[in-house]
Amino acid sequence: MENQVAQAARVQEIIQKWNKRRDLIIEMLHDVQSEFNYLPLPALDQISHEVGVPHSTLYGLATFYNAFSLTPRGKHQICVCMGTPCHALGAPRIVEALERHLKVKCGGTTEDLKYTLEISGCVGTCGLAPIVIVDGELHGFVTPVNAPKVLDKYSD
């Protein structure tokens, strides 16, 4: 209960930061996503009520943009590039190695909410293929053997 009250208070601060402006809903959603690593449904309800935007609009935005998630995500976002060069140079094996290491399937989040593992299309850094991106930081020439070691930096 205390956590819900704190969450509602933080969402209210975010709404106020953007002056309850309907044209700044995406900015509000980004802030909520950054704060909680996903968009909790009570937060969407609160934004809908406070800003006067239909739930369907918020849900549409939340499901359209890849930056948003309606389910809890890990503190650290891991993305393996599956563009043609990365794929050809072993990206599928890197995904398998990370799945084994993290004990989670691609597209999922670890039980401790520390990591979310995903794949993406080409990220435009083919000269460093294969690429793993963690929290926006590129790691090039990754192999199935060294992929788990890439995460050492993010083990906080």
Image (cartoon, grey):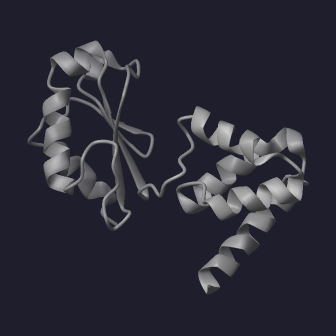
Quadrant where the N terminus lies?
bottom right
Quarter of the image where the C terminus is located: bottom left
Residue 147: x and y, percent? 18, 43
Kindly give the residue lying farthest to the top in the view shown.
84
For residue 55, above or below residue 11:
above
Label count reads: 0
The percent position of residue 119, horizontal first and vertical second, equals 33, 33
Please tell me which residue is depicted at 34% across the width and 39% down the height of the picture.
118
Place of residue 124 in the rendered image (x, y in percent of width and height, measured from the top left): 40, 18
Against 53, is 92 above or below?
above
Q: Say left or right for 31 vs 114.
A: right
Q: Is residue 151 left or right of residue 32?
A: left
Evaluate whether residue 53 shows in this view: yes
Q: Nearer the viewer, residue 54 or 145?
A: 54
Residue at 75% in and 48% down: 55
Q: Quadrant of residue 83?
A: top left
* Residue at 57% from the left image edge and 44% from the top image edge: 68
Which residue is farthest left?
Answer: 145
Q: Quadrant of residue 15?
A: bottom right
In the rendered image, is residue 26 in sight?
no
**Image location of residue 65, percent across then percent down:** 59, 34
